[in-house]
Image (tube, grey):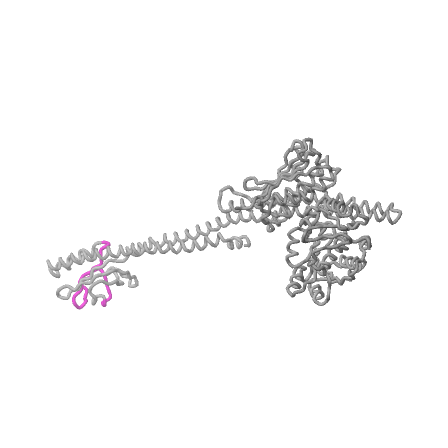
């Protein structure tokens, strides 16, 4: 019952039911129209026959008078399956004929539809219907010619039974069709519902069934599947990130904890405790920095900072960052060369671009070595390239092997060779996130020797 | 913490400050109150936005320290409400939301400074003191003086003991900021924000290099050092002779 109820509640069933009712009414109308038309045809045939008969009898009367008419009527009335005849006097007394009719019929000349009895029929109750025409002949004689409606009634019966059957078949087939279609549709929707319930419980690998017929359900299933694909990708990304975060935050946290434990266990005086606490604060500051950078990257990737895009001068930004890092380079014995000539209009988040450049420059100075030619150990360049603005930071350090270049853009990845140097390993991935946020790119190339990093962002829209 | 407070000599005219801390975390608020007390300041606490707004309107505070995410009424709306009523008390916003755009939103709402959690107390203290000084300082001063060091903001000339000290434009701005806050601790982040207009944390301490360059020009060859490093906090310029 519930299954049937469910079926009846379906949209498909409702649509088919309404369609069925409309179709049945229409069919009935067509049948009724045909029946009426056919009947009219029969009636007009009867009328024609009766008219012809009446004319012929009147002709006989004109030629041979009442006697001849009586003979002819008598002869014709005897024939099997004959028309109805009645000839009476002006007073209504029957002279000859094969029917008995109510007397009032004889007062109405012209056409009328009457009940009658055959003269030979003894059964008083048996009456038939007929269409008759009454003519008043000279001398007051009344001549009635008619034809039974039997034909019409038989035709009606012939038509009515199949019409009823036809209607029944239409209704039954309609219901069956409705149930069939509704069940088919339901089955696919049930499949979709079941799959989505499974997906909701956490199994993101599930996909909605696609029948391959290219119908609306397939299109719906395809777009939902594409959506699931995207969600699954994002979820995998999130999981990857949280795994990384767990790993890279736990390492310094462990160090932090170890330092505190170590101090508790072996510190002998206040200054021991003091230095242990200072180291702890330093370590937690580094943690916070890492955490901030991670947050920034994920925000940049989610596109949240997009609202703070402004027009700014790229050359000025490069100069400003270079100016900030120049003393640091000098302290390391490296020369820092800036190649940037304002105005160089760019569009983006100046703060984030500055941070990305600072990270790139910081890396370049950290890993850079004095150049042999003396052309500049570390260079930062800003220039236009078509509709884009390029920032190029290059150094003369060991560079990054080609095989590792994609990998270093991931969060926290630091090559084995640089493990011993300070830095959380987020600089390049942060710069890459900034590039993605601006719809640009970050490219790592060989500077032969050294590393050349290109950060491309859009210029100002003209 | 004690260290930085101890390193802070109390310059003439800088007395005890009255602060209002609007923070829903009891422990964090208590810690702040205690630390501020040790630094010589009085702090009152409010636990939610409504209480904070009521107290801020009633009391005569020197600085408000407002957390962004508060029960009942969020910090930013407290600040905009105060500003709408014409209250100009300096506000330092404290927030776990520390990204560039959060900062911009905070300052737009009427905050005077923005500090992301977790923070170093020395940083907070330095910023609070910078905020109060800002309101009492005569902004019309065209010449800053610390000891025998003079900085002319109009002619961009710096002299010490009458001797010209040539400075790069950025060095000039660095010294200008330090001198404006003479006698106060100025942190590295404050310098990065106010002199360079960057709000991120450079992984390497580039600021130290800039300051030591400046120090080489300002203090080298003179008997008494004016530019001091405050351990665990930042820098301070003051007349050491007094």
Residue at the front extreme of this rendering:
B162
Q: Is residue A92 magenta?
A: yes
Q: Is residue A72 above or below residue A414?
A: below
Residue B34, can we see it? no
- The residue closer to the viewer here, A267 or B20, is B20
> Residue placed farthest to the left in the image?
A63
Q: Is residue A215 left or right of residue A349?
A: left
**Image quadrant assignment for residue A410:** top right
Q: Nearer the viewer, residue A147 or A462?
A: A462
Q: Nearer the viewer, residue A191 or A223?
A: A223
Residue B14: horizontal and vertical position, in percent? 78, 60
Image: A128 above or below A178: below
**Residue B72 in view of the camera:** yes
In the picture, measured across the screen, residue B98 lies left or right of residue A101, that is: right
Q: Quadrant of residue B71?
A: bottom right
In which quadrant is the C terminus of chain B drawn? Answer: bottom right
Numbered disc total = 0
- Asked if residue A103 is among those painted magenta in the image, a careful observer would answer yes
Residue B44, by quadrant, is bottom right
Q: Position of residue B226 (x, y in %)?
A: 78, 51
Q: Position of residue A426 (x, y in %)?
A: 69, 42
Q: Position of residue B166 (x, y in %)?
A: 71, 46
Q: Residues in magenta?
A: A80-104
Q: In the displayed image of the protein, which residue is found farthest to the right?
A: A268
């Amino acid at each position: 019952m519930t299954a049937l109820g469910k079926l009846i509640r379906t949209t498909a069933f409702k649509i088919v039911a309404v369609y069925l009712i409309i179709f049945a009414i229409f069919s009935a109308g067509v049948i009724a129209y045909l029946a009426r038309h056919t009947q009219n045809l029969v009636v007009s045939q009867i009328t024609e026959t009766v008219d012809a008969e009446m004319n012929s009898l009147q002709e006989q009367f004109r030629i041979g008078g009442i006697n001849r008419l009586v003979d002819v009527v008598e002869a014709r009335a005897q024939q099997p399956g004959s028309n109805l005849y009645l000839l009476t006097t002006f007073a209504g007394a029957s002279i000859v004929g094969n029917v008995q009719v109510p007397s009032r019929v004889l007062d109405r000349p012209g056409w009328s539809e009457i009940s009658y009895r055959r003269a030979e029929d003894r059964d008083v109750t048996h009456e038939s219907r007929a269409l008759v025409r009454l003519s008043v002949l000279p001398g007051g004689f009344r001549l009635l010619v008619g034809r039974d409606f039997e034909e019409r009634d038989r035709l009606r019966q012939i038509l009515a039974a199949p019409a009823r059957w036809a209607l029944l078949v239409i209704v039954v087939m309609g219901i069956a069709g409705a149930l069939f279609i509704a069940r088919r549709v339901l089955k696919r929707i049930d499949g979709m519902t079941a799959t989505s319930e499974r997906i909701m419980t956490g199994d993101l690998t599930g996909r909605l069934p696609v029948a391959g017929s290219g119908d609306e359900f397939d299109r719906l299933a395809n777009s939902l599947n594409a959506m699931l694909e995207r969600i699954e990708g994002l979820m995998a990304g999130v999981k990857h990130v949280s795994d990384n975060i767990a790993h890279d935050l736990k390492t310094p946290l462990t160090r932090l904890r170890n330092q505190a434990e170590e101090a508790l266990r072996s510190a002998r005086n206040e200054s021991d405790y003091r230095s242990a606490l200072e180291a702890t604060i330093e370590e937690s500051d580094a943690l916070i920095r890492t955490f901030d950078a991670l947050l920034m990257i994920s925000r940049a990737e989610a596109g949240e900072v997009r609202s703070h895009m402004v027009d700014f001068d790229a050359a000025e930004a490069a100069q400003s960052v270079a100016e900030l890092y120049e003393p640091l380079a000098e302290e390391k014995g490296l020369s820092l060369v800036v190649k940037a000539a304002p105005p160089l209009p760019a569009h983006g988040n100046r703060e984030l671009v500055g941070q990305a450049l600072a990270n790139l420059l910081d890396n370049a100075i950290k890993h850079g070595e004095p150049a042999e030619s003396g052309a500049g150990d570390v260079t930062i360049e800003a220039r236009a390239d078509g509709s884009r603005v390029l920032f190029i930071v290059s150094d003369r350090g060991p560079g990054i092997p080609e095989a590792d270049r994609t990998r270093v853009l991931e969060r926290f990845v630091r090559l084995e060779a640089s493990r011993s140097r300070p830095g959380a390993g987020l600089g390049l991935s942060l710069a890459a996130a900034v590039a993605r946020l601006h719809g640009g790119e970050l490219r790592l190339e060989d500077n032969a020797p050294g590393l050349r990093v290109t950060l491309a962002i859009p210029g100002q829209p003209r | 913490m004690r260290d930085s407070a101890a390193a802070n000599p109390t310059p003439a005219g800088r007395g005890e400050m009255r602060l209002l801390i609007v923070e829903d975390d009891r422990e964090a608020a208590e810690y702040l109150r205690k630390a501020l007390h040790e630094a010589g300041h009085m702090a009152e606490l409010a636990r939610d936005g409504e209480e904070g707004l009521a107290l801020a309107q009633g009391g005569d505070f020197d600085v408000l320290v407002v957390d962004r995410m508060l029960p009942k009424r969020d910090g930013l709306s407290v600040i905009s409400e105060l500003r709408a009523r014409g209250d100009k008390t300096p506000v330092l916003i404290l927030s776990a939301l520390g990204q560039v755009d959060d900062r911009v939103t905070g300052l737009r709402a009427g905050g005077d400074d923005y500090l992301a959690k977790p923070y170093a107390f020395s940083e907070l203290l330095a910023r609070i003191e910078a905020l109060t000084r800002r309101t009492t300082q005569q902004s019309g001063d065209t010449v800053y003086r610390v000891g025998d060091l003079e900085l002319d903001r109009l002619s961009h000339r710096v002299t010490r003991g009458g001797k010209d000290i040539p400075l790069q434009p950025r060095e000039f701005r660095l010294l200008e900021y330090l001198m404006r806050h003479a006698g106060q601790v100025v942190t590295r982040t404050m310098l990065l924000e106010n002199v360079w207009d960057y709000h991120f944390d450079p992984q390497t301490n580039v600021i130290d290099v800039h300051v030591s360059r400046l120090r080489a020009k300002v203090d080298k060859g003179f008997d008494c050092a004016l530019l001091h490093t405050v351990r665990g906090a930042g820098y301070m310029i003051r007349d050491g002779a007094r």
